[in-house]
Amino acid sequence: MGRLMTLYSRVAGQGEPVVIVHGLFGSMENLGTQARALAEQFRVYSIDLPNHGRSPHHPDMNLQSMAEDIIQWMDEHNLPSAHFVGHSLGGKAVMELAMRYPERCRRIAVIDIAPVRYEPRHYDVFSAFNAVDPSLITNRSEADTLMKPYVQEAAVRSFLLKNLIKVDSGYQWRLNLPALIDNYDALIDQNYQGAVFNQPILFIKGGDSSYITESYREAITMRFSQVSLKVVPNTGHWLHAEKPEHISRLLHRFLAP
């Protein structure tokens, strides 16, 4: 695997292990509602991906390295296998895990992402981050004002600003922004396609989101033999935040059939 990367994680509950993985620019807190709901029946591990949240930083990051980092984390926590839930980039990471290490995966739930290569769609977000020099601001609202020309939606800015943390010297970004910029092309690439995962996998699509489309059917079925799909109407890419209880129920029914 080639590198030492001890991912930050939290655990709650008892039962079969479920590992929850957040998306790009996020952290484990993003799926906190789902983690708390699942912890009523499962032993739930929430992890921060490399260069996100409280996990270590590394200059190199791609789908395969994230899968290997999760395997190393599983070995550290004596987890031979687990169920997985992943949103967006987290879904990419767990699909890569299933492709390369199928024996470590049980059931997998992927929230609003497919195993395809995507066109870049986050340059405005990178511009918003780069508009803020954390060493020069005195409060969060100043950062919000600086980011607004690049990201119009207040809810998205609020999500991004969760990465701005207070330190003794003022503020700093918690995520590794240079690494995410440098490795962005690798993060939006297609997943490995040299294997077939034969355990059940559930794709949950936001009804108004364009991240999963009919044109991606072949890319999904060539990699996964037991596919099911649930569409959540009137939601976008952040469906777990827009309809948290609904997503929790879908996950529970899938992981505890």
Image (cartoon, rainbow, N blue to C red):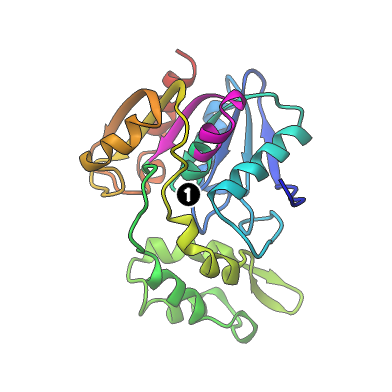
Q: Position of residue 20 (x, y in %)?
A: 56, 37
Q: Is residue 102 magenta?
A: yes
Give the quadrant of the C terminus.
top left
Label 1 secondary element: helix
Which residue corresponds to mark 1?
89
Direction from residue 134 to residue 7 in the image, left or right: right
Q: Position of residue 230 (x, y in %)?
A: 30, 29
* Highlighted range, magenta: 96-111
User: Is residue 86 or residue 170 the one in the foreground?
Assistant: 86
Direction from residue 178 to residue 256 in the image, left or right: left
User: Is residue 152 or residue 7 the one in the foreground?
Assistant: 7
Q: Quadrant of residue 54?
A: bottom right
Q: Quadrant of residue 109?
A: top left
Which residue type does callout 1 highlight?
Answer: Leu
Q: Is residue 213 magenta?
A: no
Of all residues, the one furthest to the top in this rendering is: 257
Q: Position of residue 87 (x, y in %)?
A: 45, 43
Q: Position of residue 235 (x, y in %)?
A: 28, 44
Of all residues, the one furthest to the bottom in this rendering is: 136
Asked if residue 184 is positioned above or below residue 43 in the image, the reply reads: below
Asked if residue 165 is positioned above or below residue 105 in the image, the reply reads: below
Give the quadrant of the N terminus.
top right
Q: Residue at x 61, y 87 (%)?
A: 136
Q: Residue at x 23, y 47 (%)?
A: 208
Q: Residue at x 32, y 71 (%)?
A: 152
Direction from residue 138 to residue 9 in the image, left or right: right
Q: Quadrant of residue 148?
A: bottom left
